Amino acid sequence: MENMINFQEEWIKMVDSELLKLGYKNISPDPVLKTIQLFTIYERKIDGTKRKVFLSKELASKSDKRIASIVKKFADGIDVNPHLSKTISNIDFKDMLLNDWGIYHFHLGEKIDSSGFIERTADVLFGIITNTNAYLVDIMPHDNWSEINLLEIIDANWPQLLETREVKGFIPEWTIKKNDEVFEMRKARLNYMVELKNGKIFNPNNMGYASSGHTISSVLNAQRYYHRKLSNAQENYIAKKDTIIKKLKEQYKYEKKEPYEFIAVFKEDAVGVIEKDSDIFFSLV
């Protein structure tokens, strides 16, 4: 008799293992909350993909050798996570600058200290990082997390980055125009619309943030993944298991002494199973 897989249980085991491997200990016992924790870490960390680098006019006008150093790291696909805030090591910390505006900040030290991070600097580099590009905005003093001028620079240099967030077609009753107002709204975990000097109005990044401080997108994605995607994978596995075994035998010409043993696999774009000995993957959702 072939083994039965509980996809939600296997997912929980995988999440716990992944978070522990990344060095996190304060893992929530709740399956959805720990999924949110994992998705949030994925949002905060930057993978080592080689990226095309763009400098704003404001940044390009500055003579600072540290800029060239981090530009090279992005272009060569070198790990830039040591330049991030040390709060990345705290699974419960909410980076409200990133969650609200989608902006990272990078310390500009040259040496890695005993904690594994680049030496901290009084000023930091702000930027928006996508899967393929790094848009480096400006260098400003540390703690300028509510500086609306960051959005002004982004809109002036790369308006396409904010296009999907722009409010069009109606005029809201109120908007935020001052840095201290941004700070207070984030502190209260209240979503808002920010208005720039040119009159453009923008919503938060990633659908805004929940009262917990997590992005709404990470909360919804975690809920959908755990309750819907894994349940669908469970149902499809039960319904298609015999078909999968038939496919192994007929299409892949794979024969073994039964029972077949399948293992749950969680990929970025799919949930499925592999047959333990053949390592052949079958997508379920």
Image: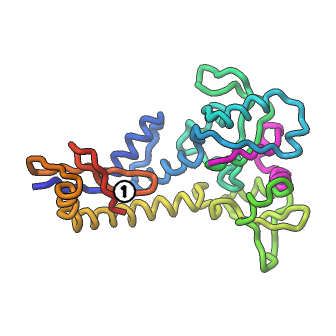
Find residue 57 and report its image quarter: top right
Between 24 and 256, the residue placed more toward the observer is 256
Q: In the rendered structure, which amino acid carries the disc numbered 1?
A: Val
Residue bearing the label numbered 1: 271
Give percent across and percent down for residue 76. Answer: 65, 33
> Residue sitting at 11 percent across and 51 percent down?
259
- Locate residue 36, reporting x and y percent: 49, 53
- Residue 112 vertical position relative to residue 81 in the rendered view, above or below: above
Image height of 262 relative to 169, above or below: above
Is residue 179 visible to us here? no
- Measuring 51% from the left and 63% from the top, which residue is drawn there? 220
| Residue 19 magenta-highlighted | no
Q: In terms of depth relative to the viewer, which is nearer, 205 or 29?
A: 205
Q: Residue furthest bottom?
A: 170
Q: State the image coordinates of residue 66 (x, y, percent, origin top left).
A: 79, 28
Residue positioned 77% across, 65% down in the render: 202
Any part of residue 34 in sight: yes
Can residue 140 be found in the magenta stretch?
A: yes
Image location of residue 145, percent across then percent down:
76, 46
Residue 53 or residue 58, whichever sits in front: 53
Out of 4 and 69, give the one closest to the viewer.
69
Write down the region rendered in magenta.
Answer: 132-154
62 horizontally vs 234: left or right: right
